[in-house]
Image (spheres, helix red, strand yellow):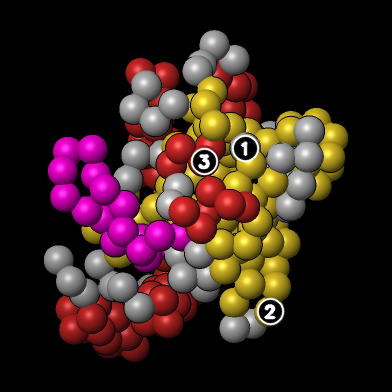
Amino acid sequence: MMLHIPNVLTREQVASMRRRMEQGEWVDGRATVGEQGAQVKQNRQLAVGSPLALELGAEVLAALERQPLFFAAALPKQTIAPQFNRYAGGEHYGDHVDGALRRLPQGGWLRTDVSTTLFLCDPEDYEGGELVVSDAYGTHEVKLPAGDMIVYPSTSIHHVAPVTRGERICSFFWTQSMVRDDARRGMLLELDQTIQSLRARLGDCSETVNLTGHYHNLLRQWSEV
């Protein structure tokens, strides 16, 4: 399941982040990937764990708290601190699959069920740089307005096309879901959205109450908390 969530950040929030990023420490992006990823990755990232990266990451996580659609789609159990990258001058990231586990700063591990990219510049600001995701339904190219984000399964093969003009800046992070299976998360999201639509039209009638009961019973059966 791929999902576009618009207006996660306001234009003012994006502009503020971009100003502060200019003072940040940017390092080789290969420092945060394994052996396979390092062979195909060419970009720069804000130093992980730096005060600025932690500050900006906290703002992104706060914005997610105001996005009920993200919760409905990802059913997050835990989300790792967001990171930030930039591509320019032909930089790119070739085909790869995100690592299944990420070490948490406080210790322990997070299973990567859901990947998210939050765009911090507009499509007209750069050429190339599409996020290209391949799944059972084909290949999807994603290039969203600043402040919008795309959510997709971490099991997908994906890449970032070379940036041939301008600069592409994004935040990215992973979520461990309470429901690890993507197909089940997709069914729950569709059922949840159907219930919301019916409630808006019909109110809390017996049919919407019954459907809500089915939703929560499926969530109860499939969730790992």
Task: Residue at 52%, 26% (x, y): give it.
Answer: 27
Which residue in the protein does label 1 denote? 43
> The C terminus lies in which quarter of the figure?
bottom left
User: Mark 1 and mark 2: span between their CA atoms?
Assistant: 26 Å
Residue 112 is one of the magenta-drawn residues: yes
Residue 157 percent coordinates (x, y): 57, 68
Q: Which residue appears at 49% of the width and 45% of the height?
A: 172
- Give the distance between the C-alpha atoms of the residues marked 2 and 3, in whole angstroms: 28 Å
> Which residue is at a point 51% across and 58% down the rendered structure image?
36
Q: Nearer the viewer, residue 78 or 193?
A: 78
Q: Which of the labelled discs sits on residue 30, or is there none?
A: 3
Check disc 3 and give the amino acid type. Answer: Arg
- x and y, in percent, of residue 45 in the image: 53, 32
Numbered disc in front, either 1 or 2: 1
What residue is shown with label 2? Answer: 138
Which portion, as a residue range, is magenta? 98-114
Q: Are marks 1 and 2 in contact (CB under 8 Å)?
A: no
Q: What x and y, as percent, mark residue 120?
A: 62, 35
Relative vertical location of residue 40 with respect to residue 168 in this rendering, above or below: below
Number of the front mark, 1 or 3: 3
**Disc 1 versus disc 3: distance between alpha carbons?**
8 Å
Instruction: Kindly state the secondary structure of the residue where label 2 is placed.
Output: strand
Q: Of tags 2 and 3, which is closer to the observer?
A: 3
Crowding at dot 1, Cα within 10 Å, few <14 / some 14-19 / many 20+, comes out as many
For numbered disc 3, what is the local secondary structure? helix
